Amino acid sequence: MRTVAVVGTSLAGLRAAQELRAQGFDGRLVMIGAEPPYDRPPLSKDFLLGKVSAGDIALAGQDDLDALAAEWHLGVRAEKLGREGVTVGDGTTIAADGYVIATGAVARTLDAARNLDGVHTLRSLEDAIALKRALAAGPSSVVVIGAGFIGAEVASACRLLGHDVSVIEAMPVPLAAVLGARMGAVCGELHAENDVRLSAGVPVAGFTGTGRVTGVRLADGREIRADLVVAGVGARPATEWLTGSGLAVDDGVLVDSGCVTANPRVIAVGDVARYRCPLRGVRIRAEHWTAAGEQPGVAVANLLAGSTVTHFARHGYFWSDQYGRRLQFAGVATEDVRIVEGDVASKRFVATYHRGDVPTGVFAIDSPRPFTKLRRAL
Amino acid sequence: MIRACSVSDLPEGEAVRLAGPVPVSVFHSEGAYYALDDTCSHQDASLADGWIEGCYVECPLHAARFDLRTGAPDCLPAKNAVRTYPVVVADGVIYVDTEARQEVA
């Protein structure tokens, strides 16, 4: 293999480049991406709070980037992958023998908010800068749509900054799909405990205001005044550019348990990859920092081997910071939840999930040491 | 030189955090003792709460790994090393020489 093109230069793309070099690839390495590599998790937390700056969240220093001896095409997006190579926005086509697809995901938006100022999403640094600026302007009422992790973190940051905050969640219990109903409800309580109003089980019907948002209309007829809205309603994989590539795409690039597509010269990693998870027996997109960091080691080994010789079989792990508390989750949630340390009422505890006698997952608030031990025992 | 704890209070695979203006932690791994700045160089987390394996400790929050011998990070998200300190064991007691901050790797 003489040339490898990595498409996408966030965490998964950078990690793929690092792994290519660490695993002995000494050919031409081409990096194609819209933005330089930076760390996204702080955007909804410390960045909004002003505790870290754009410079602090770079994923690699210039020395580290230079050490990759790569050819960088930044500020451009890949538009097509075909037999002749990757075509980028400026019309250049880059031919390679191996391709790493790491284009991530883009924030979902609400159709009803189109052409309406004051409605934000949060995915990129640019989004975070815009949101931070809007918050600095002193909105009188912030409404966050979606009580998932991004929504909850944004609500928390806005509250810590002193704003009046409401959260709207379509599902009856926030985060139930990830943490199960019981722990999802515990997370939901964090909002009220911090003077943030949570309305759960009510979808958003639309917005009020012309030109600029003035409120959010709910499906039950209520209307909540808002001069700043943040929609944290998930992300969709960035796969449009792969139309016509011949690669199978269905809510992500379909790859095997080693992150390899049907073409052994093409791998996909991070948020864009829908891989066959050996631990669950189904295809999932693991939209977490740790997966984007760890999948490239496996995927690159398979790319260099020319076939799938190793599999990504690690339990998913993620964290969230809300209202000054640290939430950590690993594995798979079930309805069999047991509190093994601390107590739920104090919001400092460790819970484990079980299937029969087998522990399948662990969730903790403000308990990193026991969490880590239990996570490692999964 | 500050007293950390007695040898019997720090089993293999465990760590103890010494409070102070700059918290320092002592780790016991594979028969050896190591002292490092306790706070992860990436974000505010206590490395004493982390996972100790061989000559590495993994941060309990974001999984950055540090070499217990040098304090150097081994993977993202950490980019900077944490400081290390000499450890002395005498008469069953573990001491850390916090005056002798060793240059970061």
Image: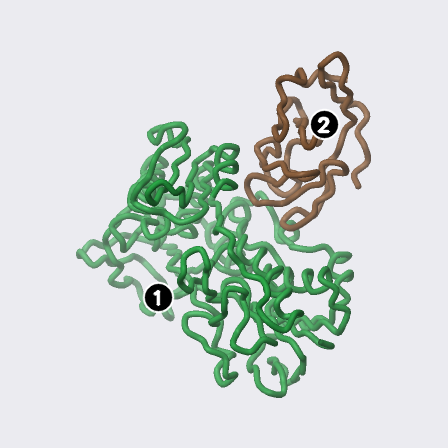
Chain colours: A green, B brown
Q: Where the N terminus of chain A falls, by quadrant?
A: bottom right
Q: How many numbered discs?
A: 2
Question: Is the residue A143 above or below the residue A77 in the image?
Answer: above
Question: Is the residue A356 above or below the residue A311 in the image?
Answer: above
Residue A74 visible here: no
Where residue B40 sits, quadrant-wise, is: top right
Residue that mark 2 sits on = B33
Task: Mark 1: give few (<14), some (14-19) or many (20+) Cα within 10 Å.
Answer: some
Residue A202 visible here: yes
Residue A244, numbered circle = none
Give the image location of residue B6, x and y in percent.
Answer: 67, 15
Give the image location of residue A304, x and y in percent.
Answer: 67, 70
- Mark 1 and mark 2 on one chain: no
CA gap between label 1 and label 2 equals 55 Å
Residue at point 67%, 83% (across, down): A95
Question: Is the residue A281 above or below the residue A30 in the image?
Answer: above
Residue at point 33%, 47% (across, down): A334
Residue that mark 1 sits on = A110
